[in-house]
Each structure stands twice: as structure tokens, then as C-alpha cells.
């Protein structure tokens, strides 16, 4: 059976979150970055998968997106580059899904952001989840005003 994953991105629980699990679209769709190395992939799996990956899978799949993905239960970890065959499996190349969710890097948040709705901790900005706190001092407010 596939690893249960939501139909969106999860993983950012605060400003210091480093990785996200994406089960639809792509890492870039949610403002995340693809992982570039097998070592980064293993670190993301250790952070995101409750029991960690069962094993790193050495096979290559022509119908699975390149990058860092996980599959199965217990989860196996797959990192591959230049393997997905876009001519034969174009709809799979570059796409994360519930069977092969992608592990992605979360870029650092900018120091300040304006919350258009909700609260600083929950407001969605640029496809990512909140992670901010309200400005607390007059000096911090001045720095935020200069930044924004």
C-alpha cells in the first residue's frame, strides 16, 4: 500500500522547518525546492517520516519523477536524477502524487511579511504556510516597514 499523504503539501510547522512532503503537483508549485543530493533526501526522510525510511531503494523508475520520493509501507526512499522518461511517461515526470510523494526543501522565510488574512502564524503567503509572529516592538515595526 502507498504511504498515506495528503493531496497537498505538509511539513512547515514554523519558520525553522527545513523539509516538506508533497503529494500533488510539484515542489515548486508550493514554493519549495527539489532536493539535489541523496544525502539531502535521506535527511529530509529522517525529518519527515515518523519511523524514518525503511531502506534506500536502489532501483530507477522511468515513470517516477526525478528527485527525492518515498513509497510503500514501511516507506522506501528513492532518489534518482535524469531517469524519468518524459517521452513515454510525460504526465509523471515532474509530478508528485500520493503513491510517490516528493520530499522537498523549504526555503527560509523572509524576515517580514504582511498577513492578508488569518494571523501571522497561519496566513498563507506565496504558497507556504504562516510561520510568522506578530511584530512586537516599535523598532521591529520600523524594520518591517523598511523591508516591506
Image: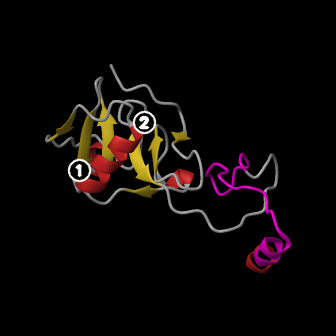
Magenta stretch, main secondary structure, is: loop
Which quarter of the figure has residue 126? bottom right
Q: Residue at x 26, y 44 (%)?
A: 88
Q: Is residue 134 magenta?
A: yes
* Left or right: where 102 falls relative to 63: right
Q: Which mark is residue 15?
A: none
- Quadrant of the frame with the C terminus: bottom right
Is any part of residue 113 visible from this angle? yes
Q: Is residue 124 magenta?
A: yes
The colour mode here is secondary structure
**Residue 69, above or below 50:** below
C-alpha distance separating marks 2 and 1: 16 Å
Q: Nearer the viewer, residue 85 or 123?
A: 123
Q: Which residues are magenta?
A: 121-143
Q: Position of residue 48 (x, y in %)?
A: 41, 40
Q: Secondary structure at mark 2?
A: loop
Q: Secondary structure at mark 1?
A: strand
Residue farthest to the left?
Answer: 58
Q: Residue at x 36, y 47 (%)?
A: 44
Is any part of residue 65 visible from this angle? no
Q: Position of residue 110 (x, y in %)?
A: 63, 67
* Left or right: where 10 falls relative to 19: right
Mark 2: few/some/many CA within 10 Å (<14, 14-19, 20+)? many
Residue farthest to the right?
Answer: 138
Q: Position of residue 12 (x, y in %)?
A: 55, 47
Q: Residue at x 51, y 61 (%)?
A: 107
Q: Nearer the viewer, residue 129 or 142?
A: 142
Q: Residue at x 78, y 80 (%)?
A: 146
Q: Which mark is residue 80?
A: 1
- Quadrant of the frame with the N terminus: top left
Q: Nearer the viewer, residue 139 or 115?
A: 139
Q: Which mark is residue 97?
A: 2
Amino acid at each position: 500500500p502507498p504511504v498515506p499523504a495528503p493531496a497537498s503539501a505538509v511539513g512547515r510547522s514554523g519558520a525553522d522547518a527545513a523539509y516538506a512532503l508533497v503529494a500533488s503537483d510539484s515542489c515548486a508549485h508550493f514554493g519549495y525546492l527539489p532536493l539535489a543530493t541523496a544525502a539531502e533526501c535521506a535527511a529530509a526522510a529522517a525529518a519527515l517520516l515518523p519511523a524514518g525510511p525503511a531502506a534506500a531503494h536502489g532501483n530507477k523508475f522511468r515513470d517516477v519523477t526525478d528527485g527525492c520520493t518515498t513509497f510503500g509501507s514501511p516507506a522506501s526512499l528513492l532518489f534518482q536524477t535524469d531517469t524519468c522518461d518524459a517521452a513515454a511517461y510525460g504526465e509523471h515526470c515532474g509530478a508528485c502524487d500520493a503513491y510517490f510523494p516528493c520530499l522537498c526543501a523549504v526555503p527560509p522565510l523572509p524576515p517580514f511579511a504582511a498577513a492578508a488574512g488569518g494571523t501571522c502564524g497561519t496566513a498563507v503567503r506565496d504558497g507556504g504556510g504562516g510561520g510568522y509572529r506578530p511584530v512586537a516592538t516599535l523598532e521591529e515595526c520600523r524594520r518591517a516597514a523598511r523591508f516591506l
